[in-house]
Image: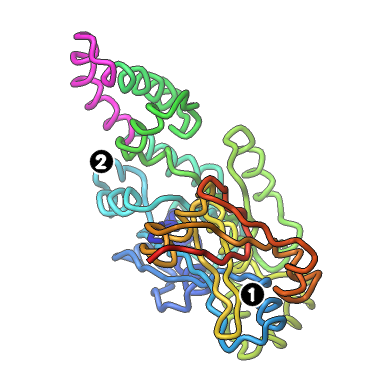
Amino acid sequence: MSLQCGIVGLPNVGKSTLFNCLSNAKAQAANFPFCTIEPNVGVIVVPDERLTVLGELVHTQKIVPTTVEIVDIAGLVKGASKGEGLGNKFLANIRETDAILHVLRCFDDENVTHVDGSVNPIRDKEIIDYELQIKDLETVDARLTRVQKQAATGDKQAKVLCDLLLRYKEALEQGKAARTVQLLNKDEEKASKELFLLTVKPVLYVCNVDEAAAVKGNKYVEQVREAIREEGADLLVVAAKIESEIAEFETYEEREMFLAELGLKESGVNRLIKAAYKLLNLETFLTAGPLEVHAWTYLKGSKAPQCAGVIHTDFEKGFIRAEVIKYADYVHYGSENAVKEAGKMAVEGKEYLVQDGDIMHFRFAN
C-alpha cells in the first residue's frame, strides 16, 4: 500500500534528523537551511509487539512486519505559495502525500540557527498554515469560477461541488484548514478528494524538544497544544537529538537501558511510526504459521474480500469465506487448534469488517 506521510516544517527544526532516525536513510542533517532539497523517501518498519508473541507461539521461521512510507520534504519559508525559496517544489511534494507530520522546534539552542532568529513554534506553525491555506484558496477560487456557471444550469454534481467550494473558501479566508469543513455525504467526500487540497490532509504535530523535556514536555509544547485545541489534530513529543543517539546503539538491550535511564517506556521514533500509520487510517491484520508470521496493511473499514486481495488479487476474486481468530484469544489459548476447540474461531463472509489484529485465513476458489 503506497500511502505516504510527509515530514514538513521550517528549515532547521529537526526534520532531517528525525527522518534519519525513522528510516536509517542518510538525508543530510546540517545546521543550515535547505539541507534537504529533493524529497527523501524512507520505507519504515511499523513496530508491532504482537508479531513477536505470535512467532514464539507458532515457532515460526520468519517474521514479516508491515511498513509505512515517510517522505522528508524541503523546508518551507514565508512566501512559498508565491514561489519563494523552494516553495513550488515544497508544495508540489506535499500535494503527493496523504498525511502530514508537521515538525515544530520546541527547544532552545543558540548553536542551532533558526531561520527567523528566535524560537516560536506558534509563529512557525502559522507560517506554514498560511502558505498552505493561500495555495488552497487559489485552487478553490479557480474551480469556483468554472463550477458556478455549471451549477446555475442545474447540473447536480456541479451544485454539490459548488456548495463545498464555497464552504472551503469561507474556512480558508478565516485562516482555517480545509479539514475543519465537515463533509455532509459521499458525494462531497468524492468531490473533496478530486480537489487535492493541501490543508484537507490529516496532520500530526511533532514537537521536537531537548532531553530535559523528553518525558513531560515544556512551555513550547503547551503553547502548541493550546493552539491546536480546536483542530482535532494530535500532538506527539519527540527529542530528535536523543533519538539519533538511540539509533547508534547496536543492541536492543542497550537501547532499552538508555530509554529507562531517561524515564521513557518507548522510543519517540516507535511512537511516531505508530502515530503515522494511524494518521493514514491504516490497520493491520495478521497471518500466522510455522513458515512465517506476517503483518498485512489495510485501510480501516475494509471488508474481508478486500483484505484477502492485499495478499493476492486471486484471493479477493475467488473469496469464499474468512476464518478469523482474535489476537487476544490466540494468546490466551496458545494455539490455533486450542482456539478452535474452545469455539473461538469465527467463520466470516463477504460483509465482515476486518478489525485491527485479526488473525485470518482466507478460503477461496481457484
In x, y percent, where is residue 262? 76, 73
Q: Is residue 263 left or right of residue 134?
A: right
In x, y percent, where is residue 331? 76, 71
Decide: is 174 above or below 330: above
| The stretch drawn in magenta includes residue 81 | no
Answer with the quarter of the image where residue 338 lies: bottom right
Q: 85 or 156, which is in the foreground? A: 156
Q: 284 or 122, which is in the foreground? A: 284
| The stretch drawn in magenta includes residue 151 | yes
- Between the residue at mark 1 and the residue at mark 2, the CA separation in whole angstroms equals 48 Å
Residue 16 appears in the rendering: yes
Q: 226 or 348, which is in the foreground? A: 348
Locate the N terminus by quadrant: bottom left
Residue highlighted by disc 2: 82
Q: Is residue 305 left or right of residue 205?
A: left
- How packed is label 1: few (under 14 Cα within 10 Å), some, or many (20 or more)? many
Decide: is 51 above or below 149: below
Q: 168 or 348, which is in the foreground? A: 348
- At a point 42% along the width and 56% down the height, the residue shown is 6
Q: Earlier in the sequence, mark 1 or mark 2?
A: 1
- At a point 27% along the width and 50% down the height, the residue shown is 92
For label 1, the SS is: helix
- The magenta segment is 135-158
* Three-letter amino acid code of the residue under disc 2: Lys
Q: Residue furthest front?
A: 365
Locate the C terminus by quadrant: bottom left
